[in-house]
Image: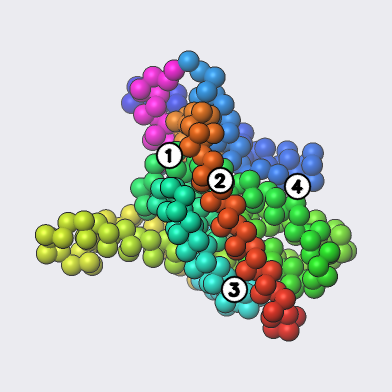
Amino acid sequence: MNNKKTGAIILCLVIGWLATLSTDWQSQLLGRTVMGGPMVALLVSMIACNLLPGLHKDFKAGTTFASKKFLNWGIILTGATLSFADILGTGVKALPLILFNICLSFAVALLVGKKIGVTKNTSILVGGGTCICGGTAIATLSQIIKALEEEIAFAMAAIFLFDTLAAFTYPYLAGAMGLTTNQFAFLAGTAINDTSSVAGAQATYVAMNALDGWNGALNVKLVRTTMLIFVALFWTIMMAKSEKNASAASNESLFSVVKKTFPMFILWFVIMAGLNTYGVFTAEGISLFGKLSKFLFASALAGVGFKIKFVDVFSKGAKPIALGGITWLCVAASSVAFVFLFAGYIG
């Protein structure tokens, strides 16, 4: 490995580390995390890419290594923070809404994306980011569907914009609409994308209503995040099926194609979630895995940012951002309708 490639990898790690630290700085200065570490890293590296006159091919090879390998490792560690048992926990009542929103999000993203000329990969990433957990879902699905780096960047931008809007407004909307604490938990937990954004919205709501120790929204979000395991497996099978259809002359069974194309990081992701379900990891270990996964995601997105030019974002990214807004509005409307129609069920 030459110096330029090694330097690029180290630079991505440094940007990822500083971007991850920035979430703490934001909390100290602003009282909440406004922008997640991965998005900060993406923006920083994009700015650097656009300021520099040109990047050596070996440097680009290093950023490609970072964007792919660090994503895989981050996904594996994310599995250690999830638990199948959480589905049976306090957020279980939200499962019907979570499952409906997953189907709705992907359906809207794929149908509308096709209508307005957004690539299928970008539509899948926008759908997954909206219905599961923002950047983490985008990172996971991008590796499964072999998305281009610009598709990842466009999806991240679309998710971040509307996620930020939801995190800032939902606590106040809940008061204006007269929602109970459980209704707010369902709304915030199912219609705000990133976990840090849900935590921020919950913190605002807790402060507004003097609910010290209340974690309803995060409980719902945790169950929703666990669905990433099943969504990842679904798209893995769909990709294998697509590859089999593309080579129709082959006599291979679908199982054989899945076995051949199955991304190993998903297997380790599921194994880590299973180990956590059976209590193998301590609370401190889970916390460490969570922090490391965020750092790796940020470092990976730093690698992605070095491939993106602002002119491409503004010229090609308008449609993905519009798609993100439409998908977000549909999921938000679904959650609002649910909390009013099933108020008695929610409590």
Residue 59 screen position, x and y as percent: 40, 24
Query: Which element carries disc 1, helix, strand or loop?
Result: helix
Give the spatial CA distance, label 2 vs label 4.
24 Å
**Residue at image coords 79%, 71%:** 179
Give the spatial CA distance, label 4 vs label 1.
29 Å
Which of disc 4 and disc 2 is earlier in sequence?
Answer: 4
Query: Is-magenta flag for residue 201?
Result: no
Q: Amino acid at mark 3?
A: Leu
Query: Which of the 4 image quarters holds residue 67?
Result: top left
Query: Which element carries disc 4, helix, strand or loop?
Result: loop
Q: Which mark is residue 97?
A: 3
Task: Name the residue beneath numbered marker 2.
Answer: 321
Q: Amino acid at mark 2?
A: Ile
Task: Name the residue beneath numbered marker 4.
Answer: 32
Q: Amino acid at mark 1?
A: Glu
Give the spatial CA distance, label 3 vs label 1.
31 Å
Q: Check the image and report above or below for 85 versus 81.
A: below
Seen as rendered, the residue at the extreme front is 115
Give the spatial CA distance, label 2 vs label 1.
16 Å
Seen as rendered, the residue at the extreme top is 53
Of the pair 102 and 304, the residue shown nearer to us:
102
Magenta-highlighted stretch: main secondary structure? helix
